[in-house]
Image (tube, coloured by chain):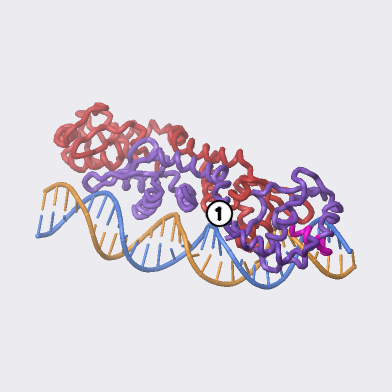
Chain colours: A purple, B red, C orange, D blue
Amino acid sequence: MQLDKIVAYHKALSDPTRLRILLLLSRGEVHGHALAEKLNLSQPTVTHHAAKLREAALIQERRDKNTVYFKLNPEFIQSGSEASLKFIFAKGVEEMEEESPEHSLKESVLRNFFAKDGRLRQIPAQYKKKLIALQYMVEKLEPGVVYSEKEINEFIKPFHDDYATIRREFIMHQFMYRENDKYELNPPELWTHWENVK
Amino acid sequence: MQLDKIVAYHKALSDPTRLRILLLLSRGEVHGHALAEKLNLSQPTVTHHAAKLREAALIQERRDKNTVYFKLNPEFIQSGSEASLKFIFAKGVEEMEEESPEHSLKESVLRNFFAKDGRLRQIPAQYKKKLIALQYMVEKLEPGVVYSEKEINEFIKPFHDDYATIRREFIMHQFMYRENDKYELNPPELWTHWENVK
DNA sequence: TCATACTTTAGATATATATCTAATTATATA
DNA sequence: TATATAATTAGATATATATCTAAAGTATGA
């Protein structure tokens, strides 16, 4: 289930009138006219809400003569709820682990921005390239180790004199995590990759 | 959990940007600036959405120096979903079974609108009273029995000559259910009671 | 104490939507 | 065929909201 569907599902349920309609339907079929009466609304308003609920597959309809009867589609109400939980909690990982076939760019950045002695000639101005350079440096840090600010500065200095800026960029792009002046590497899933950036 | 809370929960989840934020947070803390970058949005926009998510208790915040870190509140995401299913499917019954201490009105209607021989003198014009009279008659039908239209007419005639109108009112107020010209009593939970009508 | 960086607030704008009335369509019945 | 009932569509209005820019607030650090 993709984003749009989940949005539509919650939109359908994010109106008090529609929730009251579902509640009334929970005990069995009700027709449009009766809904309008019970809710003290005009019939066009009921039609309007019924359309929204139908689009989200939350109700079904049947016609008998002039009258349209509505009833719940309980499966979809349930599965929509499950889908959105899955979306938030689980699906995230694969979703964002897209392809990154840009090896050539990476190589070119490393070759052009880093000198043979390993120093960073200058901080790339272009966003993608900056991320690549930052990641290259940060990968030399030890995961799980808690660094002081001073240690981070000392780590960066051999690459570039402006350690303050680079240290800030580490945080900004989520390569690292800071709490009470202690610095620690984030897991790579949290790093900003330019592929992630819409 | 009452209607308002459930509406707020689904409203919070009914925006694609907010879902993407939750997805980004599903892997750990992220701070505002990083969210703005990853989503290609301005920081005020992130603040705006964060406020909505916080109001719905879906995220929590922590501040370190100038930076505000957001993280999921997974319990609430889960429990909101459960609550709304409960609301639609279960809670309905008690919700609507309010008090109905209007026995005196019922007695007065039965006394004044029905003659000693059981005939309905006239169809009450006042909504509440009409429902009482209709219910009184309909309760003499057998639950579970499928009636033809003709049988329903014959049933009504001893009460009142205008059986067509009364038959329609039976359907209209959900005392009965019609499908392919077959009539059947609805369960009383579906009947329109004037207490239900806002 | 001044400048910087992150966040929030204020205000503007454009879009979405919940509701209504009036008109139209669809179906059934006399 | 004309009438009645239920539903839908069209159009109007008022409110809500997602987003932006600009300004103000807040905490840090030199």
Give the residue displayed 31% in from the left and 47% down from the top: A33
Quadrant position of residue B123: top left
Task: Give how far across and how far down residue A182 sits, in percent.
Answer: 81, 48
Mark 1, residue position? A99
- A161, above or below B102, in the image: below
- Predominant secondary structure, magenta span: helix
- Report the residue that reaches farthest toward the front: A116
Q: Which residues are magenta?
A: A159-170
Q: Residues within 10 Å of mark 1 (few under 14, many from 20)?
A: few
Does residue C28 appear to the left or right of A21 in the view shown? Answer: left
Foreground of the two, B128 or B105:
B128
Q: Is residue A15 visible?
A: no
Foreground of the two, A62 or B190:
A62
Foreground of the two, B40 or A57:
B40
User: Callout 1: residue from which chain?
Assistant: A
Q: Secondary structure at mark 1?
A: loop
Give the residue displayed 84% in from the left and 64% down from the top: A161
Task: Give how far across and how far down residue A41 sits, in percent.
Answer: 39, 51
Is A163 a magenta residue?
A: yes
Quadrant position of residue B108: top left
Task: Give how far across and how far down residue D25 sits, in percent.
Answer: 76, 61
Quadrant position of residue A34: top left
